[in-house]
Image: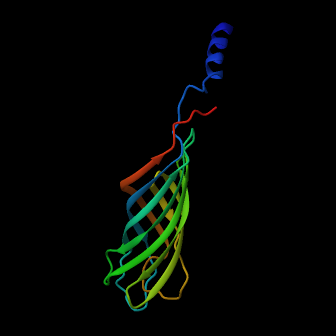
Amino acid sequence: MKLLFLLCFSTFCFSQTNSFKFSGPSEANAVLVGYQASFDPKKNEDDHDILKTVHIVEVSYSKIYDRGGRHPAFINYYVGNDFILNFKQFIIGPKFGINFSASALSFGSEMSFYTDFEKFSPRLSPFVGLGVNGFKLFISFPIKFSKTEFIPVNTLNLGVTLPVFSTDKKKSQTTTEN
């Protein structure tokens, strides 16, 4: 029994080895497409027919930096637009943001500027979720910075963002970690 224990113990002691090769740092440009659902918005005094769930489609351009190495970590800078689909008027939301991902945990923030070309409502949306390399599955909590209340995006948003097109993958040489 002791011999079996020593045999297994020695195998586990040497499980991290220098023979594995890991990729080095890289960067890529990507087009991201996403969907968000904003749940249970407040009722507006002017419009009592606001739907309970608002659907938002996101299209953005992103710069993704991969740290490389044994434990993946990504920084994702992006700029794009949100389009609100099921509302009486056309609403667009230019935005910019940053996303940090380490292993599978993702967090960040984005600033959106929603407008119907008559009224304006800036929102800061911090988020947390799962993500890696441009992909993120997240929960966000929009914070409005104006008293303009024409957009029913106020409470909790659930969303997913996917990289659909990626170019310019620049990698440094493959490295070996100790």
Q: Position of residue 148 (x, y in %)?
A: 48, 88
| Quarter in which the C terminus is drawn | top right
The residue under the point 41% across, 64% down is 61
Q: Position of residue 144 (x, y in %)?
A: 53, 80
Question: Is 118 located above or below residue 31 in the figure?
Answer: below
Q: Position of residue 38 (x, y in %)?
A: 43, 70
Residue 15: quarter of image: top right
**Tally of numbered discs:** 0
The residue under the point 37% across, 85% down is 116
For the residue pair 73 and 155, the one nearer the viewer reads as 73
Question: Is 9 located above or below residue 61 in the figure?
Answer: above
The residue under the point 60% across, 27% down is 18
For the residue pair 177 and 33, the one nearer the viewer reads as 177
Q: Residue furthest front?
A: 173
Q: Position of residue 115 (x, y in %)?
A: 41, 84
For the residue pair 44 and 148, the one nearer the viewer reads as 148
Image check: 52 left or right of 147? left
For the residue pair 160 and 170, the one nearer the viewer reads as 170
| Quarter in which the N terminus is drawn | top right
What's the coloring here?
Answer: rainbow
